Amino acid sequence: MKESVMTSLGWIKAHQELISLISLKPSMRKSTTVEELKGYLGLDKYDINIHFPAAAIPKDGPSAGITITVALISLLTGVKVRNDVSMTGEISLKGAVLPVGGIKEKCLAAYSSGIKKCILPEKNKKDIEEISKEVRKNMRFFFVKHISDAIQIALDTPLSIDDIDNVIKYASSGINAKSKL
């Protein structure tokens, strides 16, 4: 869990100026420079400490990366996470969503709790076959390769997937920080 949190925070810090666009009104996004967004999320002013009381319980492996990342982005931007979506998957420092174990059990737990949408790593697509036909018929699965895909699905935001992809690709390209978005 500690590694998942550190990776999530590292990715968010690396993209904080552009993640802050999620909370801006569409009319403000076009006229704002990356330089103007420095410090907007407050990550330079505050330390973030996350405590998971049950983290001492041994797990099969990391699988909370996208959930932690989405939750932190929601906290920092004020944009709510949808209440009808479950998610699992680990992330890399570059934002790639990595496969995890226990897909059948996680999806069944979500389904039994009334959740009908599930965000999963693209590389776990084959694991869906282990889930009963009834559950597969009644759930909608979103297979993602990058954290930007999970953000778009999970956050209640007016940004389209293309907007978020462009924000993340812009951040990853190393374009001059004084450029307009």
Image (tube, grey):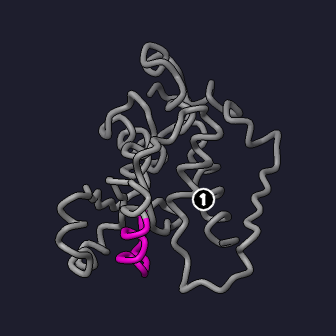
As for residue 102 lying within the magenta part, the answer is yes
Q: Which of the 4 image quadrants contains residue 35?
A: top right
Residue at 62% from the left image edge and 24% from the top image edge: 36
Give the left or right position of residue 131, taking residue 148 as reference: left
Amino acid type, residue under disc 1 in the picture: Ser
Residue 82 to residue 48: above or below = above
Give the left or right position of residue 153, taking residue 43 as reference: left
Give the left or right position of residue 167, taking residue 54 as reference: left
Residue 149 to residue 57: above or below = above
Residue at 29% from the left image edge and 61% from the top image edge: 143
Q: Which of the 4 image quadrants contains residue 155?
A: top left
Q: Which residues are magenta?
A: 96-109
* Residue carrying label 1: 8
Residue 73's x, y, as percent?
58, 44
Residue at 38% from the left image edge and 75% from the top image edge: 103
Residue at 79% from the left image edge and 56% from the top image edge: 49
* Quarter placement of the C terminus: top left
Residue 107's x, y, as percent?
37, 68
Give the left or right position of residue 9, taking residue 150 as reference: right
As for residue 162 lying within the magenta part, the answer is no
Residue 48's x, y, as percent?
77, 51
